[in-house]
Image (cartoon, rainbow, N blue to C red):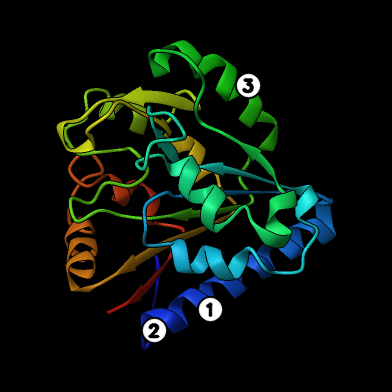
Amino acid sequence: MKFVEYPDREFLMLSLANTIAGELADFLRREDHASLCVPGGTTPGPMFDTLSGVDIDWSKVTVFLNDERWVPETSPRSNTRLLRERLLTGPAAAANYLPLRADTETPEEALEGLAEAIRPHLPISVLLLGMGDDMHTASLFPGADRLEESLSDNAPLLMALRAEAAGEPRITLTAPALKGALAIHVLIVGAAKRAALERAQGLTPKEAPIKALLANATVHWAE
């Protein structure tokens, strides 16, 4: 794990957007396509605002989420709604977006079709993760009903998980799909998240799911 500390959040967001844009541009030069997998939540919003305006060939970039709440896109808790407002605008509106959501009552009913859409874009070129105070990442929550299976090396690409802390049912990329990314970044801010990250390093992935992704990650932090 590489840990990078920034003097303030604004500089972190600008620097991380520049780093991710540079990595995507490198993949586009070498392979003529790239995939970007990102978290929901409010923390990455300012970084998305900057990244969305970067001058790269977004039409050759496929964007998808780490995870999604099983709610309609009209819900304020929809990660897709956040992405459309903050990332998939301006030049980045040309990106190919693959939603982790379908019009079914449960996520289990949609897993196969959603996984088939994502599979051609693996391994993920650039992965950005967040982390909760409880050390969850994506929808890999401590105590989730199928956490152990989702962390295993032979886990399917996508799984539906339920956890008390998660609220709604979730659909998430599993640990092996995330670990296979060619560039891995973790974005955290504030003293509580830094303390949680330090705790995670002494725990197992079952206790602290973020631990499963840290070995090859660059963690970006500001107070």
**Residue 18, relative to residue 136: is it above or below?**
below
**Residue 157, relative to residue 19: is it above or below?**
above
Q: Which mark is residue 116?
A: 3
Q: Quadrant of residue 141?
A: top left
Distance CA(mark 2)–CA(mark 3) = 38 Å
**Residue 216, relative to residue 72: is it above or below?**
below
* Image location (x, y in percent) of residue 93: 69, 52
**Residue closest to the eye, 204 or 90:** 90
Distance CA(mark 1)–CA(mark 3) = 33 Å
Query: On the image, numbered disc 2 is attached to which residue?
Result: 6
In the rendered view, does 120 fall on the left or right side of 46? right
Amino acid type indicated by mark 3: Glu
Q: Which mark is residue 177?
A: none
In the rendered view, does 88 fall on the left or right side of 32? left
Q: Quadrant of residue 214?
A: bottom left
In the rendered view, does 186 fall on the left or right side of 19? left
What is the residue that sits farthest to the front in this orientation?
74
* Image location (x, y in percent) of residue 174: 42, 33
Say which element carries label 3: helix
**Residue closest to the eye, 71 or 217:** 71
Say which element carries label 2: loop
- Closer to the N terminus: mark 1 or mark 3? 1
Amino acid type indicated by mark 2: Tyr
Distance CA(mark 2)–CA(mark 1) = 9 Å
Q: In the image, what residue occupies the spot 38% across and 36% down? A: 75
- Closer to the N terminus: mark 2 or mark 3? 2
Q: Quadrant of residue 129?
A: bottom left
